[in-house]
């Protein structure tokens, strides 16, 4: 009987991709996926450390498995990813029935580590060096990226794929754990990125999302020694047959060059959608966060985006309640959100992370209730803006990449038999569109006429069969 694998993934796109690669490597060892923990031989948790809540969730998931492991000691439980790197042996202390702890730089070792546990060699732990535990080269090497295998079944959909172009981060924003758990910033070789993208295109992938913590800071060197930036990569990927949309996340405001904006404007496969987190609207906060730019520079970047890529959608992240944030400073964030009119914003309450400069230098002194209030206030403002901007789309016809059956339709039991089903997809600008269609339209890019909107969803109707070019349909 084949072995069964249960895998739970939280965190960012990096983790989605990592899980895909781990699943692919275990499938090669004969594993099949299951969604039921009690049926699995191996249970893996791909974890995130960016906020305490994410870690607590993982510990509570692990807690639920205590009894299962007691009655089935042969089941292998593994914690991988950022929390494995962050907490290391502490995980064994808090959850003594965990067999494996594997950092994001050691994921390629998972099959052999599982074999060791199964052979009775006891608990296994493999993690990378800390950011102060060796030379830069040694540390970078210990955070190797793991990109050889792909498993189409683990992708968001069969026709969409993430491609890693960069690992790690060197920006060291004071609140952030990512540079510690993901190691030094390293650009992947352009040839490898292009070969992987071609391979994905051959398998039917139409949308590629390039991922990196600060994707627009990308620098890679090809075999001839030539240096590539993100604009170079976009131009090369644009030439690959079969690829119809190219996205990239997450951008760092300071590295949003005019050259990149020109590439986004001129390459029609590149989505006019930019996720560029601002984090705060106050210069003092940005300084304490060590973000490396001022609000004036962020505003100037927004102006260049609006002028350079007309019609582009911009989204952002904000942290509320970071150390010492006053009401007046929060108000500056509100003003920035009002002014920039982001398509959407992800808003987070500051969560102190042990080992970061922020935790060392500043007091986490904004009360939780104030963080909560500010979070709600900012979210309300953003939702109002998102709704107002979505309403402007009513009457437009937008090209939508059909991603699948909508959540609401998937819940309905009779969805399987009806020929017409509610579908969901995204525009070139990353707006979510819901409309009625049929299953064979999944994976196609279709023109949809928008007749209604909510703050995060547009509602529409397909008007004709698939259309070829997205050139003049920016939204
Ligand atoms: N590399 C990306 C984002 C990484 S984490 C970037 O630089 O934009 C995703 C988001 O989580 C960040 O943009 C930030 O808004 C939030 N975040 C990071 N650390 C946090 C912390 N300690 N508490 C709350 N939110 C945090
Ligand atoms: Fe974290 Fe800042 Fe790096 Fe983003 S740029 S991953 S927020 S340190
Ligand atoms: Fe979380 Fe690690 Fe991503 S800490 S946000 S999963 S890089």
Image (spheres, rainbow, N blue to C red):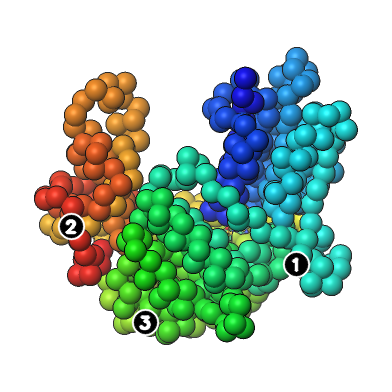
Pick the quarter of the image with the N terminus. Answer: top right
Residue 196 visible, this angle: yes
Q: Name the secondary structure under disc 2.
A: loop
- On screen, residue 285 versus residue 144, left or right, reads left
Residue 353, given in percent of the width and then of the height, sits at 72, 56
**Dot 1 or dot 2, earlier in sequence:** 1
Residue 315 marker: none
Instruction: Write down the quadrant of residue 71 in the picture.
Output: top right
Mark 2, residue position: 467
Instruction: Write down the quadrant of residue 137 in the picture.
Output: bottom right
Measured in 3D between alpha carbons, the distance from the residue under mark 1 to the one under mark 2, in whole angstroms, is: 45 Å
Mark 1, residue position: 140
Residue 262 marker: 3
Name the residue located 35 percent from the left edge and 55 percent from the top edge: 206
State whether residue 39 is above or below residue 287: above
Name the residue located 12 percent from the left edge and 57 percent from the top edge: 395
State whether residue 45 is above or below residue 450: above
Name the residue located 72 percent from the left edge and 55 percent from the top edge: 105
């Amino acid at each position: 009987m084949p072995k069964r694998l249960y895998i739970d993934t939280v965190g960012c796109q990096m983790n989605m991709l990592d899980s895909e690669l781990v699943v692919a490597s275990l499938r090669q060892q004969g594993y099949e996926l299951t969604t039921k923990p009690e049926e699995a031989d191996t249970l893996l948790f791909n974890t995130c450390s960016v906020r305490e809540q994410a870690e607590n969730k993982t510990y509570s998931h692990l807690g639920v498995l205590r009894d299962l492991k007691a009655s089935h000691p042969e089941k292998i439980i593994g914690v991988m990813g950022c929390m494995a790197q962050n907490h290391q042996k502490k995980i064994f202390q808090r959850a003594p029935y965990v067999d494996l702890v594997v950092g994001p730089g050691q994921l390629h070792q998972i099959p052999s580590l599982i074999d060791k546990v199964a052979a009775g060699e006891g608990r296994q732990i493999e993690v990378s060096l800390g950011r102060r535990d060796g030379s830069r080269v040694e540390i970078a090497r210990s955070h190797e990226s793991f990109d050889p295998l792909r498993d189409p079944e683990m992708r968001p959909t069969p026709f969409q794929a993430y491609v890693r172009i960069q690992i790690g981060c060197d920006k060291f924003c004071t609140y952030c754990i990512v540079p510690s758990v993901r190691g030094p910033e390293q650009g992947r070789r352009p040839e490898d990125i292009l070969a992987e993208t071609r391979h994905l295109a051959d398998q039917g992938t139409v949308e590629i999302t390039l991922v990196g913590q600060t994707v627009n800071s990308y620098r890679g060197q090809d075999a001839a020694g030539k240096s590539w930036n993100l604009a170079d990569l976009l131009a090369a990927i644009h030439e690959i047959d079969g690829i119809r949309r190219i996205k990239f996340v997450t951008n760092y405001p300071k590295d949003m060059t005019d050259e990149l904006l020109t590439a986004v404007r001129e390459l029609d496969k590149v989505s006019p959608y930019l996720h560029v987190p601002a984090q705060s609207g106050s210069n003092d906060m940005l300084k304490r966060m060590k973000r490396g730019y001022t609000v004036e520079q962020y505003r100037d970047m927004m102006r260049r985006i609006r002028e350079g890529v007309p019609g582009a959608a911009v989204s952002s992240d904000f942290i509320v309640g970071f150390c010492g944030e006053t009401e007046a400073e929060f108000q500056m964030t509100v003003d920035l959100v009002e002014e920039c009119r982001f398509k959407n914003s992800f808003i987070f309450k500051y969560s102190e992370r042990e080992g970061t400069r922020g935790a060392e230098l500043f007091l986490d002194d904004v009360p939780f209730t104030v963080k909560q209030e500010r979070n709600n206030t900012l979210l309300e403002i953003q939702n109002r803006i998102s709704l107002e901007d979505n309403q402007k789309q009513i009457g437009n016809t937008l090209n939508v990449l059909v991603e699948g059956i909508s959540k609401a339709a998937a819940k309905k039991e009779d969805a399987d038999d009806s020929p017409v089903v509610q579908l969901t997809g995204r525009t070139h600008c990353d707006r979510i569109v819901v409309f009625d269609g049929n299953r064979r339209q999944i994976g196609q890019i279709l023109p949809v006429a928008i007749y209604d909107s909510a703050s995060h969803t547009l509602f529409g109707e397909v008007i004709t069969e698939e259309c070829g070019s997205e050139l003049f349909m920016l939204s």
